[in-house]
Image (spheres, helix red, strand yellow):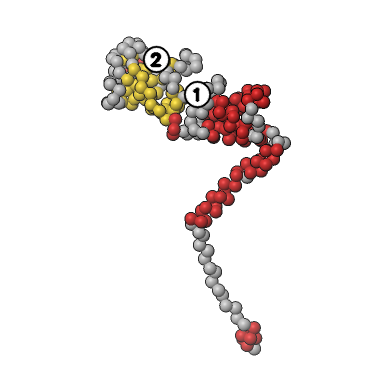
């Protein structure tokens, strides 16, 4: 599997990995539970790890006299790494900081126009944070470039596609199902290996020793005096 795997294929993968029937008619009752776990695992992975494959750039135009804009739906607002401002969206990008407050309004009144945009902020009065505002109010048409992480796509309908790698999601969900139902035949076969981490440490150790064999220093041989020599010295 890869990025952008359809939900129906994720469900099929989970059923295959857990030893369940692949017949759609046989798994109707379990579908909601599997979908819920797929959603939860993808969300957990998305928020707890860095994903270079999801890094993206979105350019948004500015409008003269307007300081409130719709946030780009393809970008996660809580994973914006940098914002820059440009006259033409091609060159001359200037950094735009996050946060608008009294310090900014002391420099330029709240409704005063200016250029370039120097600060931005997610609109706290808007739920669920789907708009952002800029300071100062743009006095010309230009561009803001947002750099960050692609938004997490929902997995509800069968043709919805995953944001993360499908195989990773399937294996995480399968592990959860096997751990919560350890009495199954497949679980009894697979769980001991999962509990041992699939013996990855042993594989790594063997590979390391094959590439870099350990060098053991030989201990120096110390000669011990013979019994005859000890008796002669005592005499």
Quarter of the view holding residue 33: top right
In the current view of this chain or complex, which residue is farthest to the right? 183
Q: Residues within 10 Å of mark 1 (few under 14, many from 20)?
A: some
Image position, residue 89 (x, y; %): 30, 23
Give the number of the mark in front: 2 or 1. Answer: 1
Residue at 32 percent across and 20 percent down: it is 143
Quarter containing the C terminus: bottom right
Alpha carbon separation for disc pair 2 and 1: 21 Å
Q: Secondary structure at mark 1?
A: loop
Q: Residues within 10 Å of mark 2 (few under 14, many from 20)?
A: some
Give above or below for 213 relative to 171: below
Residue at 49 percent across and 28 percent down: it is 4
Image position, residue 183 (x, y; %): 72, 36
Q: Which residue is mark 2?
A: 69
Image position, residue 171 (x, y; %): 58, 35
Labelled disc at residue 77: none
Labelled disc at residue 153: 1
Q: In this view of the protein, can residue 79 be seen by the observer?
A: yes
Give above or below for 17 relative to 141: below
Give above or below for 99 relative to 216: above
Q: Earlier in the sequence, mark 2 or mark 1?
A: 2
Residue at 42 percent across and 26 percent down: it is 80
Would residue 30 be found to the left or right of residue 75 on screen?
Answer: right
Would residue 22 be found to the left or right of residue 130 on screen?
Answer: right
Between 117 and 17, the one lying in front of the other is 17
Q: Secondary structure at mark 2?
A: strand
């Amino acid at each position: 599997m890869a990025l952008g795997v359809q939900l129906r294929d994720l469900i099929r993968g989970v059923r295959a990995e857990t030893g369940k029937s692949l017949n759609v008619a046989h798994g109707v009752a379990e579908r909601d539970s599997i979908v819920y776990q797929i959603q939860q695992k993808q969300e957990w992975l998305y928020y707890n790890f860095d994903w270079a494959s999801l890094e993206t750039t979105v350019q948004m135009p500015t409008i003269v006299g307007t300081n409130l804009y719709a946030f780009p739906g393809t970008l996660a607002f809580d994973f914006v790494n940098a914002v820059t401002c440009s006259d033409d969206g091609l060159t001359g990008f200037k950094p735009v900081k996050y946060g608008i407050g009294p310090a900014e309004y002391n420099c330029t009144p709240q409704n005063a126009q200016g250029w370039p945009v120097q600060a931005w902020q997610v609109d706290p009065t808007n739920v669920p944070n789907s708009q952002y505002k800029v300071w100062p109010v743009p006095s010309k048409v230009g561009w803001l470039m947002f750099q960050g992480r692609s938004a997490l796509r929902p997995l509800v309908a069968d043709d919805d596609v995953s944001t993360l790698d499908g195989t990773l999601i399937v294996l995480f969900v399968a592990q959860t199902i096997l751990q919560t139902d350890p009495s199954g035949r497949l679980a009894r076969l697979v769980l001991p290996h999962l509990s041992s981490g699939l013996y990855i440490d042993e594989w790594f150790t063997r590979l390391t020793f094959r590439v870099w064999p350990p060098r053991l220093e030989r201990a120096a041989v110390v000669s011990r005096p013979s019994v005859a020599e000890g008796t002669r010295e005592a005499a």
